[in-house]
């Protein structure tokens, strides 16, 4: 696969065991473009949310493949885009098949559960980026791959607003009709493990 060819990762990437020498190049808001340039990558995989960096990478004449991460369909399509760009299409097609099979398995389990309880639970997905200041600004997962994933799994998003990640006060949280609240951790990956 690609792990042994990996030269750089963000602080939020899960480092493959075989990519121990891959250098960290920052994160979404503090990407170190000079470090990427120095690594001389044959291709950089980037997301739509990083478009300012994508423009700068193109100016530096670094081959960049932009993948879409904001919808489940976009993530599915990204498997093929990466496979084609890195000449490993049979591997990425197999990984996509395995991923979809797991999702289908969970969707059937959840559907069976929903039939038993005769109800479709409302799930509130929350996350935060502000742990350092001891006050968490909680954001709800809205119009994004999170919502697509909930729908795929026969679940309902308790947040039905038109924004993807609105900050919610404690009072606003109490007004949402959530049966289950899931807090998504967005902390950097532990470099020791």
Image (tube, helix red, strand yellow):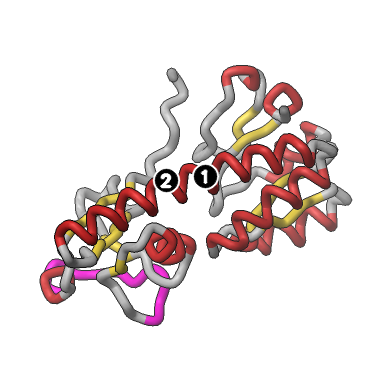
Q: Classify residue 137 by image quadrant.
A: bottom left
Q: Where is 4 relative to 55, above or below?
A: above
Q: What residue did someone put label 2 on? A: 105
Contact check, label 2 and label 1, Cβ < 8 Å: yes
Q: Is residue 107 magenta?
A: no
Q: Where is 170 relative to 77, above or below?
A: below
Could you tell me residue 4's position as x and y percent? Answer: 72, 22
Could you tell me residue 182's position as x and y percent? Answer: 25, 52
Could you tell me residue 133's position as x and y percent? Answer: 25, 50
Q: Secondary structure at mark 2?
A: helix
Q: From which residue to which does the magenta span run?
A: 162-172
Q: Is residue 167 magenta?
A: yes
Q: What residue did someone put label 1 on? A: 101
For this view, does 28 lie left or right of residue 151? right
For this view, does 61 lie left or right of residue 52? right
For this view, does 1 lie left or right of residue 75? right
For this view, does 170 lie left or right of residue 2? left
- Identified at 64% across, 22% down, the residue is 19
């Amino acid at each position: 696969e690609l792990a042994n060819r990996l030269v750089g990762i963000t602080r939020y990437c899960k480092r493959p065991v075989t990519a121990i020498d891959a250098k960290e190049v920052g994160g979404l808001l503090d990407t170190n473009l000079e470090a990427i340039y120095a690594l001389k990558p044959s291709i950089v995989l980037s997301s739509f949310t990083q478009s300012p960096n994508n423009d700068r990478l193109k100016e530096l004449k670094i081959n960049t493949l932009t993948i879409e991460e904001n919808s489940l369909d976009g993530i599915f399509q990204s498997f093929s885009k990466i496979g084609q760009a890195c000449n490993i299409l049979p591997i990425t097609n197999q990984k996509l098949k395995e991923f979809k099979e797991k999702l289908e398995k969970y969707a059937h389990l959840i559907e069976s559960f929903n039939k038993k309880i005769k109800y479709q639970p409302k799930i509130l997905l929350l996350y935060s980026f502000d742990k350092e200041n001891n006050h968490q600004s909680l954001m709800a997962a809205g119009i994004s791959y999170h919502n697509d994933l909930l729908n795929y799994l026969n679940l309902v998003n308790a947040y039905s607003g038109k924004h993807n990640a609105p900050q919610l006060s404690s009072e606003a949280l109490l007004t949402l009709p959530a049966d289950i609240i899931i807090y998504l951790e967005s902390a950097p990956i532990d470099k020791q493990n």
